[in-house]
Image (tube, rainbow, N blue to C red):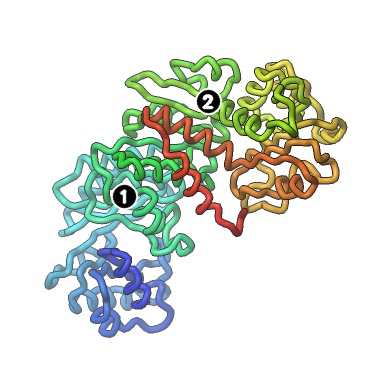
């Protein structure tokens, strides 16, 4: 454990929490503390408080008191024990409150209670069950400046509070030393906080953008947009927001409280956001789906960059001598899927004069989409009943970690076909691998993803996007093992 702390200190970490409840066997503080390479917080959390301590309460309290006597820099004391452990020496007291079920309505009352227990730092950690819980936590930090306060929401819905709390200058924030060793739900790694979100550089003037979806943990949009911000030296951050469908209206109405300037929109919200948009780009109105929102005061502008990105990606692949200069005109296209991405792509294909067939596992959705755009719907089981020139996968089939799945079997592919997979992680899905083995021209999801993100970046910032920086960042993230 000390070796791990030494490694963290070499990375620039200024404070390390030592969780005594995670140590197997006897805890020898007289040996551990003199060897600590950084200032240290001693914590020993009970099972009831989300920890792993299985000894007696008397033993736990003795460890905490021993840490104070040994001169540790910080000790974490829960609210119910803080009054019984007096201040001693130079050790600073973190008086903490945890609720692993919800974010209570009385956050201010909780803060006031903790403030009466001689804290040097107050820590409040609660479970987010609604994106708005993050706003309530961030407002708490903004209101209470008299005592340094750490406030965060746990869970994947609470991740924004961990990133944006820095705008209120907390004494520190929590991160895990490795992405695979999370100690609390929704926690980010030190590398993510410092390299992706540039957490220590955020301030009240930082412009906030983000991506909304459910789920959202798989999205690589924060990686590429934050890399682009950093490359151009912009004081901006791009945050993942998990927003369930039932919370979408409130989240979109909360944009001023979040300080949002723009959003990317992904599954399942690309169609549902339309009812909140006050100014529609003509293509959005035509296709009935938006993947980009721009906030200007009370105005929400809706855009869709999927359509342009997809058509440009296809046209780049369909060049002479393999294909005539007519591009997509008159080509028979099979679109797999009937969600928001499919709507945008079908709209673009029809504008280019393609003959479009749509299929999905929910035939009613295929029929509705086909009727809207003057296309043809076919059942999922009959998708091999035609021989298309182009196949476009708009389903998540084949996405990491389900990399052994494909929505279109290889023995139905022909060398003259173009196979386009909108899945970008991994880049080389089973569908793309099979298509290459069959001699087909392929278009990967990376091409479309970078193009649509670059168009979004231009809408967000008004600046030319550093496309190659974004592309290389994505390639590194998905890695050769997944490609």
| Residue 73 spot, x, y in % from top left | 20, 69
The alpha-carbon separation of the residues under discs 1 and 2 comes to: 30 Å
Q: Residues within 10 Å of mark 1 (few under 14, many from 20)?
A: many
User: Disc 1 designates what residue?
Assistant: 199
| Residue 302 spot, x, y in % from top left | 47, 22
| Left-right relation of 174 to 301 | left
User: Disc 2 designates what residue?
Assistant: 304
Which element carries disc 1, helix, strand or loop?
A: helix
| Corner quadrant of residue 76 | bottom left
Q: Residues within 10 Å of mark 2 (few under 14, many from 20)?
A: many
| Left-right relation of 374 to 272 | right
Q: Residue lying furthest left in this view?
A: 89
| Residue 276 spot, x, y in % from top left | 46, 21
Foreground of the two, 482 or 183? 482
Q: Quadrant of the N terminus?
A: bottom left
Above or below residue 318? Residue 441 is below
Which residue sits at x=39%, y=30%?
A: 460
Which residue sits at x=60%, y=59%?
A: 481
| Residue 350 spot, x, y in % from top left | 68, 19
């Amino acid at each position: 454990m000390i070796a791990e702390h030494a490694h963290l200190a070499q990375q620039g970490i200024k404070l390390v929490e030592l969780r005594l409840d995670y140590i197997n066997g006897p805890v020898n503080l007289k040996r551990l503390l003199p060897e600590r390479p950084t200032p240290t917080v001693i914590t020993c959390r009970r099972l009831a408080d989300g920890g792993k301590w299985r000894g007696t309460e008397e033993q736990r309290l003795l460890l905490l008191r021993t840490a104070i006597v040994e001169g540790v820099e910080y000790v974490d004391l829960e609210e119910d024990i803080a009054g019984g452990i007096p201040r001693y020496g130079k050790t600073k007291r973190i008086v903490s409150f945890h609720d692993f079920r919800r974010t209570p309505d009385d956050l201010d009352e909780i803060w006031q209670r903790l403030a009466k227990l001689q804290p040097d730092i107050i820590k409040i950690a609660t479970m987010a069950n609604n994106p708005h819980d993050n706003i309530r936590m961030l407002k708490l930090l903004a209101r209470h400046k008299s005592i340094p306060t750490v406030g965060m929401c746990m869970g994947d819905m609470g991740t924004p509070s961990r990133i944006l709390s820095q705008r209120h200058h907390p004494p520190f924030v929590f991160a895990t030393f490795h992405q695979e060793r999370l100690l609390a739900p929704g926690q980010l790694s030190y590398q993510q906080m410092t390299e992706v979100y540039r957490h220590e550089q955020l301030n009240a003037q930082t412009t906030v953008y983000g991506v909304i979806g459910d789920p959202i943990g798989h999205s690589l949009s924060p990686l590429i947009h934050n890399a682009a911000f950093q490359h151009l030296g912009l004081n901006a951050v791009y945050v993942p927001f998990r927003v369930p469908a039932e919370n979408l209206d409130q989240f979109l109405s909360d944009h001023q409280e979040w300080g949002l300037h723009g959003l990317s929109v992904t599954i399942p919200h690309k169609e549902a956001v339309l009812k909140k948009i006050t100014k529609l780009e003509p293509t959005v109105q035509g296709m009935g789906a938006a993947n980009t929102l721009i906030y200007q005061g009370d105005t929400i502008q809706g855009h869709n960059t999927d359509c342009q990105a997809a058509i440009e990606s296809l046209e780049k692949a369909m060049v002479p001598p393999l294909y005539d200069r007519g591009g997509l005109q008159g080509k028979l296209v099979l679109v797999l899927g009937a969600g928001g991405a499919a709507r945008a792509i079908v709209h673009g294909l029809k504008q280019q004069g393609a003959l479009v067939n749509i299929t999905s596992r929910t035939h009613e959705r295929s029929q509705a989409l086909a009727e809207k755009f003057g296309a043809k719907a076919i059942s999922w089981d009959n998708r091999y009943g035609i021989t298309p020139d182009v196949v476009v996968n708009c389903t998540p089939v084949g996405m990491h970690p389900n990399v052994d799945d494909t929505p279109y079997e290889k023995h139905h592919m022909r060398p003259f076909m173009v196979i386009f997979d909108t899945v970008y992680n991994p880049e080389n899905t089973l569908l793309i691998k099979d298509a290459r083995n069959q001699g087909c021209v392929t278009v990967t999801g990376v091409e479309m993803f970078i193009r649509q993100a670059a168009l979004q970046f231009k809408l967000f910032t008004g600046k030319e996007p550093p496309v190659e920086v974004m592309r290389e960042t994505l390639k590194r993230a998905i890695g050769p093992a997944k490609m």
